[in-house]
Amino acid sequence: MQSSKIPPGQYKYDRVKPPKSIFDVPRFLKELLGGFFTRLFYIFSIVWKSGPIFLFLMCFVALFNGLMPVAGAVISAQILNELQIIITESAMGKAFTLAAFWGSMVLLLLIAFFTYRILNKVVTRLSNAVTRMAGERVVRHVKIEIMNKAQALDLSAFDLPAFYEKLENANREAGNRPVSILSSTFSVISTVISLVGYMVILATALPIAAFAIALAAIPSALVNFIYRRRSFAYMRGRSVDRRQMNYYASLTTNKDLAKEIRMYDIGDELKTRYNNVFERYYRGLRSLIIKENIWQIVLAVLTSLLSCFFFAYIAWGVFEGTYLIGDYSLYTGALTSISTSVTTLITTSATIYEGTLFIDNLLSFLKEKSLVVPRIKEPLHVKKGTAHTVEFRHVSFAYPDTTRRVIDDLCLTLDPGETVALVGLNGAGKTTLIKLLTRLYDPTEGEILLDGYDLRDYDVGDVRRLFGIVFQDFGKYAFNVRDNIRLGNLDRDGTEQDIRHAAAQAGADSFIDKLADGYDTNLMRYFDAEGTELSGGQWQKLSLSRAFYSDADIIILDEPTASLDPLAEQEVFRRFDELRGNKTTVFVSHRLSSATVASKIVVLENGRVAEEGNHRALMDKNGQYAKLFRIQAERYLEESGTK
């Protein structure tokens, strides 16, 4: 299990040292807030791209929410002062009639006050609506950016645990965090406007109070920012723990594993592993939370005592006649509001700061660079609809962060119109060779030539559109049958007849015609309770249909018939060979009986070409291929005899 201790200095966000003196404060603030405004500007840009109107509405709401509380406090205070004057005059014998009331300042102030209350409710509802709509659009925008980046990145990225950490972090931040940060930012703006207003009010009567309350908030602000940074550093450092917890939790809800988990009673083991990781993760987080709140409690008590002193001072002023009752309400309200505003300002700013640190996860993912790109400024374009020659020249390849060569100094030529079978034991490099051919990876050494030019000089999209491919782990899509086939070439303006023809070529038409809605049948039950679940063999025939529909110049089958029995597989390859026309075809199979239809058989061993030739030539050679073929043939004969 992973150690619970985070290596010191591993994460840049926990390396900020406190200031050594007053002259060291600029350095401290620069390190503490490093990149904050850049990240905040990025969030603003996301909302702007999602819909500029939302940004304007948020600005209006922020301005309104900042000014109106101050206006409301002033109006309330004036109402109390006017009432006190009326009461005082009445006590002195002056009559106050109903007609006088209707014409008094009190009525106008009450109208203004309730107008303020109505506007406040309207703007609050407007703010909620804007935030929700903006949130949905921002989530869509960020998700699309993540999808675009994931699609553009090299396949090699998916081989690295660090990539999954970035992907997990990016997906986690794709929710409402950007809008939450933006809403909090505008809340801070509103709070600052209100704070300035209250301080101006208080400064007219008690300037020292306004200054003292603001100054007392500085320690609390520093504690908030420091612990937000530490919290972020801890959570980023614990990314592996979170991924482990998500992994263990997802296994228990995985449809494909549900049977095995129940049969072997694995559920309790998964819960135990989840709890073990959680306890390790929670232990450090709990310590941070407790330490931060101890500091905040101490500071809150001190601030409250300071506020209490000024409340008593203003009350004494009323007793002496320096202030009116309305003034007491206004000034103590201003004191309370300043204290509350400063606290809100600190906590909200710290939340924004922490949120922008987490946005770094998203930015880090979006900044990932793809290395599988054309190596020349003006890439070559593949000629479609013609025969092609592919040549591997001393090609070697090792997967990222590994040293073992899966392909080792391999030389091989695929001539136009050939049917090439790649055979060999597990780990011989067959699937890796296909990945290099389709430029999902680039060779570590050597070169692959397409029609005499290095594959790396071509447009990547052109190269991949050259191939119609069915992988061993082919996709199963919760679409209808027709759309599952169309995925083979979405750029093709194929007719219904083209789709049906592709299905017939793959032998899928026999079961499609028996489905309730034929080609309109929804597959899988992710979204449709009436969706049809196909067998493994049926899914494979559907994936073969995609390859036929692709109308590509080179067809590749990477063990697409593993779920079929040997006779059915051989029939598929035979049929495929008949229908492919003059297209070059490459297929991978563990069953050598299927390789007999190939015009060229390439035997791979430890990433090298061990043997090459057609079936008859290799059998006559009596080498590795012949040995493997006879072993498999004997096994099939034995199985046939027992039946």
Image: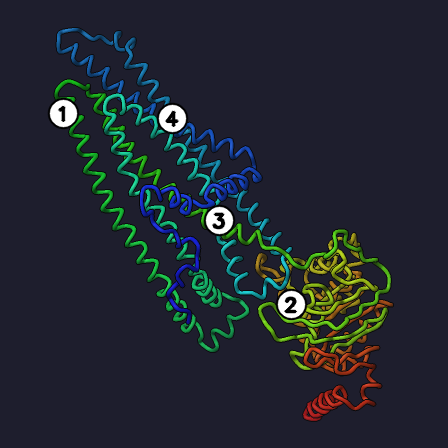
Q: 58 or 383: nearer the eye?
A: 383
Q: Which residue is disc 2 drawn over?
A: 534
Q: In which quarter of the image is the C terminus?
A: bottom right
**CA gap, disc 2 to disc 4?**
63 Å
**CA gap, disc 1 to disc 3?**
50 Å
Q: In which quarter of the image is the N terminus?
A: bottom left
- On the image, the x and y values in percent for residue 104 come to 28, 10
Circle 3 Cα neighbour tier, 10 Å, few/some/many (<14 / 14–19 / ≥20): many
Q: Locate residue 344 relative to residue 459 in the image: left or right.
A: left
Q: Which residue is drawn at 42% across and 47% down?
A: 31
Labels 1 & 4 near each other (Cβ < 8 A): no
Location of residue 494 with respect to 427 vertically, above or below: above
Circle nearer the N terminus (1, 4): 4
Q: Which mark is residue 359?
A: 3
Select label 2 or label 3 by which is in front: 3
- Residue 560 seen anywhere in this rendered image of the structure: no
Select label 3 or label 4 by which is in front: 3
Amino acid beneath label 1: Trp
Circle 4 Cα neighbour tier, 10 Å, few/some/many (<14 / 14–19 / ≥20): some
Q: Which mark is residue 515?
A: none
Q: Residue at x 80, y 64 (%)?
A: 450
Amino acid beneath label 2: Leu
- On the image, the x and y values in percent for residue 412 come to 78, 74
Labels 1 & 2 near each other (Cβ < 8 A): no
Amino acid beneath label 4: Leu
Circle nearer the N terminus (1, 2): 1
Circle nearer the N terminus (3, 4): 4
Amino acid beneath label 3: Ile
Q: Which residue is disc 4 drawn over?
A: 67
Circle 1 Cα neighbour tier, 10 Å, few/some/many (<14 / 14–19 / ≥20): some
